Amino acid sequence: MEKHPQEPWRVLEFYSGIGGMRYSLTRAGLNAKIVEAFDINDTANDVYEFNFGHRPYQGNIQSLTATDLDSFGAHAWLLSPPCQPYTRQGLQKQSNDPRAFSFLNILELIRDISRPPIMLFVENVVGFETSDTHSRMLEILEEADFVTQEFILTPLQFGVPYSRPRYFCLSKRKPLSFQNPLFDNQLLYSPTPLSWHADKEVLCEHDQTQESLDKLIRSCEPIERFLELKSPSQQPGSGFLDATGALADDFGALEQDGKRDGDDVRSLKQYFVPLNLIERWGSAMDIVYPDSQRCCCFTKSYYRYVKGTGSLLATVLPEKKGKASSLKNQGLRYFTPRELCIAWKQFKHSSGYSSTAIFIC
């Protein structure tokens, strides 16, 4: 579908969830309008409606037809399909997983649409890029005269102390092109910070040494900036629970959210790790501190299990960090839901904002 220069971008948001893609689109400051969002999850749609005042279409995306998609007159599609068919801990059925069917169906419909989109943006878990679904996606896009640029990005590249790489695909239908054609039809991955030229071209270095990874981590903000309760003191033996605090939002803007008093301290106690779990699983725990600049990826099993589900925060700084000191005396706790949201939100701001800006420009 062609677009007039002064016309707003008409966008379809597939697998909309709670609206991360829409939020990034808004943050990019583009003249764009979400004409429809799609998600089958009732709870996610409740949150989306609360956030944006619009309830997504709640039906099976696989039932959409070419006529349905044509009726929206959309210039761009944002797609974040289910990741379960491609995760390392899943069954890895890829395109044979029923949860992959709707995504493939939407892609196949591009050939039948009288007014196909001129841009697509796809996000998924690392592992998708090696799947047969990915191969089929690239085949369809090439047949439909699209050019693609693919990236694996981690929050660490945007200064967020959270190690969770994700796959992103940017795609434009010819004669449109990207500002830097050097990256066309490539998958780019590098554990180094992303930077920008004055002309907004992305620089991706390809140095993947341990030294470059260490440099990347040192460039990140400390975890303390993302905590609900922060302490001005980081001396050994100090308890981080005794401080009042504010919520870090957007690297410096502080969001005051209700009371910051003893009630917060009491409510925080529910997140402390029981001693019996520390005794049993301490050797398998990933321990971080308020001044740490990295934490592990959090999974849906966080809070239920401590092994391999995400990092734990030490609230009392020992003489020697890590497992050289007794974990029982470090006041280990889980990160709160709000803290996890802040970190992920900041990554969605940065990566989504940056990718969307590249995508639309």
Image (tube, grey):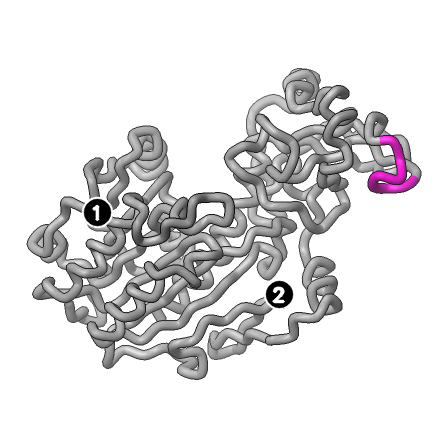
Residue extending furthest bottom?
Answer: 182
**In which image quadrant can residue 283 be found?**
top right
Horizontal and vertical percent position of residue 91: 43, 45
For marks 1 and 2 on the same chain, the one whose residue lies earlier in the sequence = 1
Q: Is residue 164 highlighted in magenta? A: no
Residue at (36% x, 43% y) in the render? 19
Bounds of the magenta span?
320-326
Left or right for 158, reference 211: left
**In which image quadrant can residue 32 be found?**
bottom left
- Disc 2 marks a residue whose amino acid type is Pro
- Disc 1 marks a residue whose amino acid type is Glu
Horizontal and vertical percent position of residue 102: 24, 49
Tag 1, which secondary structure? strand
Left or right for 331, reference 202: right
Vertical arrangement, residue 228 with respect to residue 27, above or below: above
Quarter in which the C terminus is drawn: bottom left
Tag 2, which secondary structure? loop
Q: Nearer the viewer, residue 220 or 33?
A: 220
Residue at (64% x, 46% y) in the render? 296
Q: Which residue is mark 1?
A: 36
Q: Nearer the viewer, residue 285 or 27?
A: 285
Task: Give the number of marks.
Answer: 2
Task: Give the number of the disc on residue 191.
Answer: 2
